[in-house]
Image (cartoon, rainbow, N blue to C red):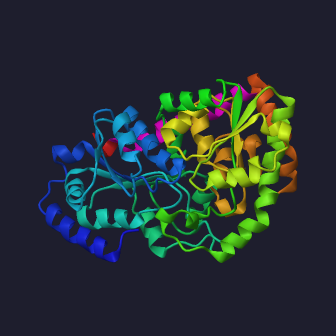
Amino acid sequence: MQSRRSFLKYSALLSGLAVGLDAFGQAAQRSILLRSSWQVENIGDIGHTPGVITLLEQHYPDVEVRLWPVDIGKGVDQMLAKRFPKLKIITSEADVGKAFAECAFMLHGSGPSLVRGKDLALWKEQTGKPYGIYGITFPGVYGLPADRWKFKPEDISIMTGAQFALFRDSASLAFAREKGVKSPIMEFCPDGAFAADLKDDAKATAFLKNHDLKDGQFVCVIPQLRFTPWWELPRKNQKPNADKHARNEAMKEHDNAPIRAAITAVARQTPYKILIVPENETQMRIGKEMLFDPLPDDVKQKTVLRTEYWLTDEAISTYVRSAGLFGIEMHSPIMCIGNRIPAIVCRFEEQTSKGIMWKDIGLGEWLFDLDKSDDIDRLVPAVLDMLTNKKATSQKVDKALAFVHKRQKETMALMRQYLS
């Protein structure tokens, strides 16, 4: 998070650059400032950015995009540069000031919340130019019960001041309206990661060959705890949260046992192998402890545990070679559906309302609430059906993706008047 000192430094710099700017100058008319790239320890948070840039590339091929990232370390910058050679990535305060002066529109990218609302407020204060919010959950608090559904009062005015405020799940849209957000356009918008098309076929095919996983003959699986234990990663520099850890320990068997049951059913009742994969850097350990190690020996023989983290490009190249995916995460399923691979989502209350987007795009039959025993009971049959009833599975994917594409086209059009 930016410190107050950094915020003031930006303010001073931008104040000087913005004075005397012709808001209708040619440079401003043809450039978008995208605020995105929230963290690199999660392939879904990485995936938001290339997804939105791909959409901008498709719908505004002649418009320059400048990415103002929070974090693109650990090789993510190189991955983005490879896919988007024309992309300008902001790396300094001077670059931020130049973008404020020259860009016509600021877009807050898809994400778990209004991650950088204060930067939108600064943009409005310093430039007076329009801005929009593209596919967020609101408020998106991954907290204990006492903390959920809390938000900063200023977020209401920031969203109200946007030319459009788009939400990636209907529950967030309803909540924003209930709390008084009055942006001129408030609608559902698919998460930006649906459009992510990064690929690293060489890494993916090498890994699959090394583990004897053949194209179309394996299914991917993802574990999770109630709260991602970010405190396990030194780079995050977070203190352990005793209450969250206790909740994780209390629920980890309850939540992951149904996933193991589905793995076992796939191994014993279908020809498919299983590949346990991570969506974030803590899940290699979780996958080993909660999914792989407790499996019966005959099931282990058909199961591969990925023990290293990966980036979004290799993950997508792996997913598109799979028969499908299921697990307790959101963005790997999103990127699967975006690339026409079937995916089942399991969720629980601690993951906020983001999972509701599966109902919003027409995949409610593939959404499972692990806080509901009836949903747990129907998970194994649904996984088997997804993998064996190929025609119905393909139709579900195509129908959902057609709706996603329709909303992408409609929501991308909302910027046209500011970039003409």
| In the rendered image, the vertical position of residue 191 relative to residue 248, given as above or below | above
**Is residue 126 visible in this depiction of the protein?**
yes
| In the rendered image, the vertical position of residue 160 relative to residue 52, given as above or below | below
Picture coordinates of residue 410 (x, y %)? 48, 39
Quadrant of image for the N terminus: bottom left
Q: Residue at coordinates 60% horizontally, 56% vertically from top-left?
A: 282
Q: Which residues are magenta?
A: 393-416
Picture coordinates of residue 216 (x, y %)? 67, 24
Q: Residue at coordinates 15% horizontally, 62% vertically from top-left?
A: 17
Depth check: give the residue in front, 72 or 287.
Answer: 287
Depth check: give the residue in front, 115 or 206.
Answer: 206
Depth check: give the residue in front, 67 or 20.
Answer: 67
Number of marks present in the image shown: 0
- Left or right of residue 25: residue 173: right
| In the rendered image, the vertical position of residue 142 relative to residue 311, given as above or below | below
**Is residue 371 visible in this depiction of the protein?**
no
**Magenta stretch: dominant SS?**
helix
Picture coordinates of residue 239 (x, y %)? 55, 74
Quadrant of image for the C terminus: top left
- Left or right of residue 164: residue 253: right
- Left or right of residue 95: residue 110: right
Q: Is residue 413 magenta?
A: yes
